[in-house]
Image: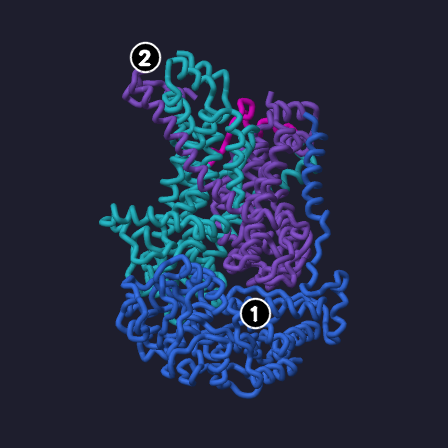
Chain colours: A cyan, B purple, C blue
Amino acid sequence: MSSTDGTAPPDPPAGEPSAGEPPARATPAAEAPAKNLDLGPVGHLGDRLFAGLARGSGGLVVLIVAFVGIFLLALAIPALADDKSSFLFSRIWEPGGADPKFGIAALFYTTLISSVIAMVIAVPIAVGVALFTTYYAPKRLAAPVAHAVDLLAAVPSIIYGLWGILFFAPILRPVIDGLADALGWIPLFEKPASEDLGVVFTASVVLAIMILPVVTAISREIFAQTPVTHREGALALGATRWEMIRMAVLPYGRSGVVSASMLGLGRALGETIAVLIILSVPNGNDPWNSSIFAGGETFASKIANNAAEFDSPEKTGAYIAAGLVLFVVTFLVNSAARIIVARSTPGGKRQRRPRPDKALEGATP
Amino acid sequence: MTTTLAANRPAYDGKALDLTGKSGARAFRNTLATVLIVLCFLIALVPLLWILWTVVSKGYHLLLDANWWSQSQRGITVRRVGGGAYHAIMGTLIMSLLCALIAVPIAVMGAVYLVEYGKGTKAAKVVSFMIDILTGVPSIVAALFVYAVWITVLGFNRVGFAVSLALVLLMLPVVLRSTEEMLKLVPDELREAAYALGVPKWKTILKIVVPTAFGGIITGVMLGLARVMGETAPLLILVGYSKNINTNPFDGFMGALPTMINQDRTELALQPAADRVWAAALTLILLVLLLNILARTIARFSTIKSK
Amino acid sequence: MSVNRLLRVGTVAVASLGVLALSACGSDPEPSGSSNPSSSGSTSASGGDCPKGTLNAEGSTAQKNAIEEVIAKYNEKCADVTVNYNPTGSGAGIKQFNASQVDFAGSDSALKTVATDGGETEAAAAAKRCQGSPALNLPMVIGPITVAYNVDGLDKLVLDGPTAAKIFQGTIKAWNDPAIAKLNAGAKLPSAPIAVFFRSDESGTTENFAKYLSAAGGGAWTGKPAKKWTGTGAGKEKSAGVAEGVKSTKNSITYVEWSYAIDNKLGIAQIDTGAGPVELTADSASKALAAAKPAGTGSDLALKLDYATKAPGAYPIILATYEIACSKGLSAEKTALVKSFLSYFASADGQGALTDLHYAPLPEELRTKVDAAIQSIS
C-alpha cells in the first residue's frame, strides 16, 4: 500500500482525501442548503439527464461496495461453514482438504499488535515534525522539509520492505536485544530464541516509518490552520511558544490528529508487501509466541503469500474470509476516527478555515 | 466556534497556566519542548533520508542511460546488464491512465451528486458511508474481488485492464472525496448568479461550478494516480509480468514498475538485478513526484478565491 | 477566474504526461552477442521453423533462472517470438494452466493423478483444459536443492539423511549435537542453537526436500511431504527470502536451490548417502538422476526420483521441474509456438546453457525421450 494521498499541498485549500474527515467543511455561504436554490425548470431534459448521471454515479458507488461485500461474503460463507475449528479463536491455518481447519486468532493478534506499535511510535513523532515545520522551522527550511516528507509517501511499499529487512533490521537488532534483556519478564517482550531479523517489532518500526509521512502531512495542514487570532492572543498574554502551542494549536488540531492517526492505522493494518518481505512466519508445530520479538503473519501478508495457491474454492474461501475480517477491522477503525472527530468538536464540524468574524469575537476577552 | 475557543482559554485544563512573569520553570519547559520537537524532526529525518539515499544512490546511474527510458528487458536475464524500463513505465502509465479514465468521471459525478443534488438527504448519507467503506478496502481485497469477477465468473484472461479495474476501486474514493471538498468550496454566490440569469442547473454545474473547482479536481486526480501507481498487490494477482513491450491492456501480459521491482528483488545477490530494483524504484518515485509537481502547479494557478 | 486558463493548464498537464509516454519510442534491447546492430529481425535466418507470436507461461520459481536464460537464447534464434514466464510457484502455474490463462506451465512435481482436495485431480482438470487430450509432463530442468548454512568458521559441513531430518524436524537443536559432531570430526561446531528457515509459501522445493527427508531420514521426519512445510523453523517468502534469512542470521540453516546458495555465498553441506560424503556438483547431481526411473508409461515422462539412493558419488536431493503442456487441443498457432520453444529448451543447445547457472543438464537418454514427446504434440 504505497499510497500518496497524504501529500496534499499545504498551501492551497486542497481537499484532503481522507476517510476520517468531517463530512462537511462549511464556508459561510455554503451553509444554505443547495436544494433551496434549485430554481431550474423542472422538466428540462438536460437537467434531468445530468441529475440522472450524478445520481447514477452515486448509486454506482453504492452498488460497487455492495457487490464487493456480497461477493466476498458469498465466497467466504461456504468455507466458513466447512471450517472444523473456531474461525475467530483458533490459530491453526490448514484450509482446503477434506478436513479444513482455519482460524484467525494469530493473524488478528499480529495484525493488531504490529499496527498499534507502529502508531505508538509514529504519532508522537509525526506531531513533532508537523509542529516543527509549522511553528519552529525557519520559513525557508519549512517548505523543502514538508515536500521531502511528502515525497516519502511516494516511495513504493515494496521498497520500504526491502530497505527494512536488508539495511534497517540489522541496525535494529541490538535495540531488540536490549529491550528483551530489560523487559524480557513480560511475555510481550520475551527474548527471541534465534538471531532471526524478521520479527514483529521490526515490521512495526518500518510500518511506523511508512505511515509517518501521511500522519505528518495531515497534522501539518491542520496545525497550519490554527486561527492567527488564537495564536496571537496566547502570545499577547505572555505565553511562551510551547504554551501557545499547548493552548491554541494542540486543542485546535486534536481531532485532526486523531483522524490522521486513524487513517495511518488503517494503512498499517492493510499493508501487504512490506510486511510480507520482513516478517518471518512461525511454523505450525511450535507453541504460540505472543512476543513482539518473534515472527508472525498479518491478514494481508498471509493472503499475499498464499495468493498463488488459491487452487480450490474452499481454500480461496478461507483466505477471502480472512480478507473480509481485515476489511471489517479497517472499516471499524475508520468509523471510530469519524466518531471521535465528531464527538470532540460538538456539532460535528471542525473549522478548518479561519472565520475572521467569529474568531475575533471569541478571542476578545 | 465558541466551544473551541472556550477550550483555548487558559483555565481550560484545570491547572491554570501561570502566565505572570517568565519564571525559570516555564522557560525550561519551553526549551525542553523545543528540544523535543527538533529531536522528533531529526529522528524522523534519519530513516526517511536513509531510504531516499538508498534508492537514489543505488538507482541513479541506470537512469542516466538513455536505454533505460527507451528499451525493454526482453532477452535480459538477471545475470546480464542492459535493457531498460520502457515496458514497465508504459505498463504503469497505461494501466493507471485507463484506471483514471474510468474512475474520474464516476468520482466527479458522484461528488456532484453529493454536493449539488443529494446534500442532506438520506441517500447522500448512504453514498458517503459507502465511500468510507471503499476507502478502507485493502488493495489485496480489491484485487481478489476483481479476480473473482473478471476471471472466475466472466472467464476472461488476466490482462492489464483487470488491474485498471482493481485500481478504480482504490482511486475512486480518493478522487471523489477531494472533488467533493473542492466543490464545497465553490461559493454559492456563483451558483445563485447563474440561476438568476436563468441558466439551468446542469449548465451551471458544468460551466460554472466544475470549471471553478477544476484545479482542485485535477490535484485530486493526480494524487489519486500517484496512489495507485505504486500498488503491487493487484498487479501480482491480475496480470502476468512481461519483460517485453505490450501496449495493449486487453491482451497478454504486461510489465509495470512495481512488478519489475518484484521480479528482480528475488535476485538481489546479483548486481545487475539489484541495480535494476533500485533504478525501477527511483523511476517510480520520479513519476509520482512529477505528478505531485503537476498537481501543485495546477493548484497554484487555480486557487479558488472565495470572495 | 479564467476558465480558459484552467482548461489550458489541465491540457498542458495531460499533454506532458502523454509526451512522457510516447516521446521515447521504446524498443527491445539488441540480443547480447550480436554485434550487428540492425539485425534483430534477420538473425533468425538459421531457424526455418520460427513461428511468430506470443507464448505465456507461469509456474515454478525453481526454474526461473533457467527458463529466462533459455528464452534469451531462443530469442537470438527466433526473434519474432515473445515468451513470457511468470515465476509465481508451481501450484499457481498449474492453476493458471488449467484455467487456460497460460499456454504451458512449469511445475516442480508432475500433475497429480490422485485428488487431494476431494475434487477433480490436477491431471483431469488439465485434460479438460486440453479439450480432452492428456497434458504432458515434460521433465526439463534438473535443479539440485542444497542444504545451505551460515556458521562462522565452518567451511565444510557433512550431514546424512537422519541428521538432516532431525535438524529440520527440530529434534536436533544445537550445532554441537553429538550426531552432527560425529559426521564432522574435527570441525569446530558452536554451541549455539540452530536457526532453521523454511519457505513460507507453498513450494515444490519444500515438497521435494521433504520427500528426501522422508525417504532418507530413517523415520526421523514425521510429516507427509507436501508443498507446505511441516517441520520446525521460521518461514521466509520464496527462495530469495530463505537465502537472505540465512545470509543475515548466524548459525542458521535452510534448504534452497543451488544458484541461490552460490549467489548469496552460503555454505553448502555435503550429503553422506551411506557411500561417503558427496559434494554437490553438476556431475554428482546428474548421477542421482541416472538412478531415477520413469513413473509412468509411454509418453508420460513423470520421473520417480530415488532420494534414498546409495549410488557412489550421487547427490541425492534433486528437483525436476516439468513443463506441463497439452498433447493436443491448442490452436494451431499456439501449438507451433509451444513446439518450437520447448524443442529448443530440450535441445542440446538449450540444455547446455543451464550448467553455468547451477542446474544439471538432462541426461542424453532422457533428453531424446523428452524431445520425442514434444514432437508428438499436435
Q: Residue at x 25, y 46 (%)?
A: A182
Q: Quadrant of the N terminus of chain B?
A: top left
The mark found on residue C66 in the picture is 1
Q: Magenta-highlighted stretch: main secondary structure?
A: loop
Quarter of the image where the C terminus of chain B is located: top right
- B83 left or right of C155 in image: right
Q: Is residue A95 left or right of residue C323?
A: left
Determine the CA span between mark 1 and mark 2.
78 Å
Check the image and report above or below for A152 versus A255.
Answer: below
Q: In the image, are marks 1 and 2 on the same chain? A: no
In the picture, residue A15 is in which quadrant?
A: top right
**Residue holding disc 2:** B21
Estimate how packed mark 1 is, as few (under 14), some (14 to 19) or many (20 or more) residues with alpha carbons within 10 Å: many
Viewer-closest of A170 and C96: A170
Residue A211 is one of the magenta-drawn residues:
no
- As for residue A24 lying within the magenta part, the answer is yes
The amino acid at mark 1 is Ala
